[in-house]
């Protein structure tokens, strides 16, 4: 187990006590709450609630990576380096995104098998973040903004700052959906956190294409009311103004990708209906 530098000793000891300091122990752990969703494949996710010897409770999340097809493994090596496991890549991505000034999880620990090349299994443990995914709470929040339109403007501003900080540091998310942006207003202001950083990387080529893809994923997944009322303002802020020609270039690239996502979603729905017959 590799532990982040600032993790308190009491938590490290608790992880060891629970058997979470080895790959075998992590994969055998049955004390957490399993979190399932379609498309996870050989991955597993788990919510942990651990109490240390001082009586403090730590809310954590653990992601377990099983074996991968060779093609996917090679693709990851080309992106992150040879024999870098998914867990190590995610751990390092969290540190990089935090260094860019973006609020996200705190990295806690990771581990991987080292008995053979390729790290067949690996796991990573991270902290929880405040709030709830915009995918779940966005509609309700926008409805509440009818009486507080300033909050909707603040959401747009904060969202723009988050994406600009990520892209400005040279990174792209590759899964920048509303399900991976958490909104918290418990302290009287809009605060956003970015999660699921497993595929974050710094492209060396075709940066426009990768950034436009991030923005398309966001536009596709945000509540329609926000897109209708705030998207143009968001994009202008993201581009720091600029002329109409530049705005049009970005809009065409983003909307083309959004339309392709919609077509894929429609085909998937139609296949599902056929399977039910």
Image (spheres, rainbow, N blue to C red):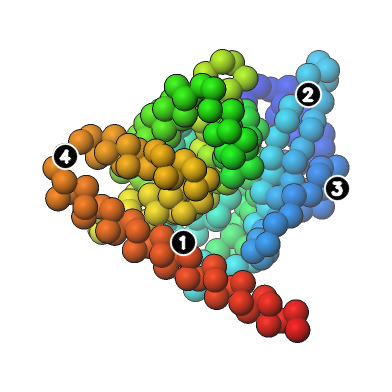
Q: Nearer the N terminus, badge 3 or badge 4?
A: 3
Circles 1, 3 touching at the beta carbon (< 8 Å)? no
- Mark 4 or 2: in front is 4
Q: Nearer the N terminus, badge 1 or badge 3?
A: 3
| Distance (Cα) linking label 3 and label 2 | 18 Å
Q: Position of residue 39 (x, y in %)?
A: 64, 64
Q: Position of residue 62 (x, y in %)?
A: 69, 44
Which residue is found at the position 53% from the left and 28% from the top?
146
Q: Which residue is mark 2?
A: 57
Q: Position of residue 198 (x, y in %)?
A: 52, 50
Left or right of 236 in this view: 65: right
Mark 3 residue element: loop
Which quadrant is home to the C terminus?
A: bottom right
| Distance (Cα) linking label 2 and label 1 | 35 Å
**Would residue 168 be seen by someone viewing this image from the given angle?**
no
> Closest to the observer: 38 or 234?
234
Q: Is residue 237 above or below residue 274?
A: above
Q: Nearer the N terminus, badge 3 or badge 2?
A: 3
Q: Which residue is mark 4?
A: 242
Q: Which labelled disc corresponds to residue 76?
A: 1
Q: Which labelled disc corresponds to residue 30?
A: 3
């Amino acid at each position: 187990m590799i532990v982040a530098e600032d993790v308190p000793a009491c938590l490290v000891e608790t992880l060891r006590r629970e058997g979470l300091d080895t790959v075998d122990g992590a994969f055998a752990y049955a004390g957490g709450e399993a979190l399932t969703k379609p498309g996870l494949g050989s991955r597993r996710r788990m919510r942990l609630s651990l109490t240390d010897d001082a009586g403090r409770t730590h809310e954590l999340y653990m992601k377990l990576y099983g074996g991968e097809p060779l093609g996917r493994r090679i693709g990851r090596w080309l992106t992150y380096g040879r024999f870098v496991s998914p867990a190590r890549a995610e751990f390092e991505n969290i540190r990089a995104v935090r260094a860019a000034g973006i609020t996200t999880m705190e990295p806690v620990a990771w581990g991987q098998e080292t008995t053979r090349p390729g790290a067949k299994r690996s796991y990573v443990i991270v902290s929880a973040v405040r709030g709830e995914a915009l995918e779940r709470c966005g509609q309700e929040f926008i409805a509440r903004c009818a009486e507080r339109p300033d909050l909707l403007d603040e959401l747009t501003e904060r969202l723009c700052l988050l994406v600009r900080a990520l892209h400005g540091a040279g990174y792209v998310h590759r899964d920048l959906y509303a399900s991976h942006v958490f909104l918290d207003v418990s302290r009287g202001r809009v605060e956003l956190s970015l999660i699921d950083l497993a595929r974050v990387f710094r492209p060396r080529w075709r940066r426009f294409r990768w950034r436009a893809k991030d923005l398309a994923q966001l536009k596709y997944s945000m509540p329609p009311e926000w897109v209708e009322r705030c998207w143009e303002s968001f994009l202008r802020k993201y581009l720091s103004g600029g002329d109409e020609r530049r705005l049009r270039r970005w809009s065409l690239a983003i909307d083309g990708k959004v339309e392709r996502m919609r077509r894929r979603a429609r085909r998937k729905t139609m296949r599902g209906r056929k399977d039910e017959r």
